[in-house]
């Protein structure tokens, strides 16, 4: 009964098989491996972006901070939500890697709205040279609360960003979970909506550790390469990143894994709903935010369930409800879910 995070799950055996197959002979390092060329071709095909520049790193934080530092200047502001991973879970990485750009928190909600963004953008302009200057907008898809921006919502945010001449970054650590939830194409959820750079996640969706940074306009590509190297995120034995990403994008493994994760979360959410749990956010992908009585949490923890409480602790009235985050990855079995639901 492990629902702490999709980061906790095992790598998919198809990824491990690809790593083993890649572990033969010699390959040029630092991204010059032959597999990387295949990865670039495959991603350009999937995203319908024949000119896209594609780079691999090992963590989602690296993908985010390197993409954002390439898009911004130290005197600028990055616009995101309060709960954005780049704000709360990257230890000021964006501020560090950008050389000092600040983060302006546009909304306390799971999703920012065009009105939120426009208000924040207007607020950055009235101090002239004395104030921070407007910079990139970063959107997380799937959001940190397990919800998914619709294509219209993404387009509207990108339209506001472009009206101020600003680039848009998409934190897609759970990109494919959102994609299968919307039933759209990668192009529709990125460049066709107005996204300039996407952190395309693989780690949470069955890979061992690989993320792709995709620039739809390659003009910024060279700078990213410098930043990746000086940021110590360029793998010497790069073939093991390439092998993972190529296997991930082969035989629809990326889609199969995300569909499985979302389906398991839907099954868990249905059981929680039947048990009377209150949902703070609509579970639209593979993460659930549901409130249960402390006594129920205690019973689940005592039985070995693993997950994180979100807005409280076990200290307090037993019948009082506390929200917890439940995350399903590709590997979660129905037996785990059924055992958990039987304890509610
Ligand atoms: C929304 C989001 N973005 C980025 C990341 C960063 O990924 P990593 O932990 O691999 O640095 C995470 C981590 O789980 C995440 O949840
Ligand atoms: C850091 C932690 O939040 C991680 N990003 C997760 O979603 O599990």
Image: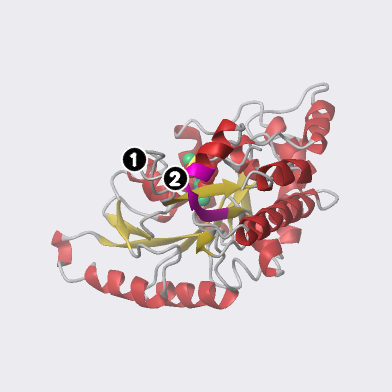
Give the crowd class for mark 2: few <14, some 14-19, many >=20 residues within 10 Å. Answer: many
- Mark found first going from the N terminus, 2 or 1: 2
Q: Main secondary structure of the magenta part?
A: strand
Q: Nearer the viewer, residue 287 or 35?
A: 287
Q: Secondary structure at mark 1?
A: helix
Question: In the image, which residues are magenta?
Answer: 288-296
Where is mark 1, residue-wise? 96
34, above or below 319, in the image: above
Say which quadrant the N terminus sits in: top right
Viewed as shown, does residue 99 lie left or right of 209? Answer: left
Q: Is residue 218 above or below residue 58?
A: below
Q: Residue at 48% across / 30% down in the picture?
A: 232
The residue at 77%/39% (across/down) is: 35
- Mark 1 crowd level (few <14, some 14–19, many ≥20, 10 Å Cα): some
**Residue 72 located left or right of residue 172:** left
How far across and down, in percent of the image, does residue 12 sit?
77, 37
Horizontal placement of 205 versus 157: left or right?
Answer: right
Q: Ligand 1 within 8 A of label 2's CB?
A: no
Q: Nearer the viewer, residue 108 or 342?
A: 342
Secondary element at image label 2: helix
Residue bearing mark 2: 65
**Residue 11 sits in which quadrant?**
top right
Q: Are marks 2 and 1 in contact (CB under 8 Å)?
A: yes
Give the quadrant of residue 50.
Answer: bottom right
Q: Please name whichever residue, 184 or 65, is drawn nearer the observer in this view of the structure.
A: 184
Q: Name the spot of residue 344 as percent of width and height, x first.
A: 61, 48
């Amino acid at each position: 009964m492990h629902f702490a995070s999709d980061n906790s799950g095992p790598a998919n055996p198809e990824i491990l098989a690809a790593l083993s197959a890649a572990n033969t002979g010699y390959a040029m390092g630092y991204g010059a491996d032959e597999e990387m060329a295949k990865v670039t071709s495959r991603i350009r095909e999937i995203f319908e972006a024949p000119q896209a520049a594609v780079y691999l790193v090992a963590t989602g934080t690296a993908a985010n901070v390197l993409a954002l530092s390439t898009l911004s200047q130290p005197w600028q502001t990055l616009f995101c939500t309060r709960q954005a991973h780049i704000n709360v879970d990257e230890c000021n990485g964006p501020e560090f890697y950008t050389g000092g750009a600040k983060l302006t928190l546009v909304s306390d909600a799971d999703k920012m709205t065009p009105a939120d963004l426009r208000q924040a953008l207007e607020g950055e302009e009235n101090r002239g040279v004395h104030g921070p200057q407007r910079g990139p907008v970063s959107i997380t898809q799937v959001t940190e609360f397990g919800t998914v921006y619709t294509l219209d919502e993404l387009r509207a945010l990108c339209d506001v960003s472009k009206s101020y001449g600003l680039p848009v970054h998409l934190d897609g650590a759970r990109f494919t979970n959102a994609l299968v939830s919307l039933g759209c194409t990668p192009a529709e959820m990125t460049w066709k909506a107005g996204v300039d750079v996407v952190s395309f996640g693989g780690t949470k969706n069955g890979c061992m550790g690989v993320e792709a940074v995709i620039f739809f306009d390659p003009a910024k590509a060279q700078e990213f390469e410098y930043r990746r190297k000086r940021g110590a995120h360029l793998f010497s034995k790069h073939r093991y990143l390439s092998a993972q990403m190529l296997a991930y994008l082969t035989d629809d493994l990326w889609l199969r894994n995300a569909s499985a994760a979302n389906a398991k979360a839907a099954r868990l959410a249905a059981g929680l709903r039947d048990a009377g749990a209150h949902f703070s956010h609509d579970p639209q992908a593979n993460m659930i935010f549901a409130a249960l009585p402390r006594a129920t949490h205690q019973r689940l923890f005592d039985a070995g369930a693993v997950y994180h409480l979100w807005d409280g602790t076990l200290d307090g009235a037993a019948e009082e409800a506390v929200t917890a985050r439940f995350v399903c990855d590709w590997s979660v079995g129905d037996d785990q879910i059924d055992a958990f639901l039987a304890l509610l």
